[in-house]
Amino acid sequence: MIRGLAAVAGLALLLAAGGASAQEGTSAHMEGCLIWSGQGAVGARNECSRPITLLFMVLDDPEIVTAELAPGGRFVSRVEWGQPGGFIFTACPVGYTPNVPFAVENKDAIGLSLYNCVGGKPSS
């Protein structure tokens, strides 16, 4: 009986440890940290105390621009506000990437902020 309880306790500890490491690899996005410019070139400033990796894409140009923004850091694109086509972006802590592939076909999910950030380098 005691061996059975010890085995159950050991299994519970193993499961708890596995859950903790899975949680450590996930983070909420950091879009709320960005203050966007209102005119001229589309750009943003990181207002949080943690560095951010910003992925940015103009919808009619599939080139992905990646920028790391330190606290107070700025990003400026080559696109002007009001130009047709639009853009998408994600904002994750440095070292994290969106759990939704950063691609035009995911523009609706990304545009609605329906992603989290997972440990790993930014990729498409």
Image (cartoon, helix red, strand yellow):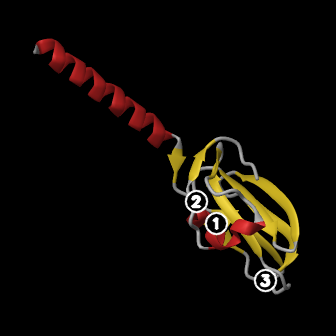
In terms of sequence position, does the residue under pointer 1 or pointer 3 come before the other?
1
- What kind of residue is marked 2? Met
| C-alpha distance separating marks 1 and 3 | 15 Å
Give the left or right position of residue 3, taking residue 121 as reference: left
Residue 46: name its quadrant: bottom right
Q: Is residue 103 above or below residue 67?
A: below
**Residue that numbered label 3 is attached to:** 39
Q: Residues within 10 Å of mark 2 (few under 14, many from 20)?
A: many
Task: Tell me the SS state at disc 3.
Answer: loop
Asked if disc 2 and disc 1 are in contact, CB closer than 8 Å, the reply is yes
In percent of the image, x 33 and y 33: which residue is there?
16
**Residue that numbered label 2 is attached to:** 30
**Residue that numbered label 1 is attached to:** 34
Asked if disc 1 and disc 3 are in contact, CB closer than 8 Å, the reply is no
| C-alpha distance separating marks 2 and 3 | 22 Å
In percent of the image, x 79 and y 74: which residue is there?
42
Q: Nearer the viewer, residue 8 or 30?
A: 8
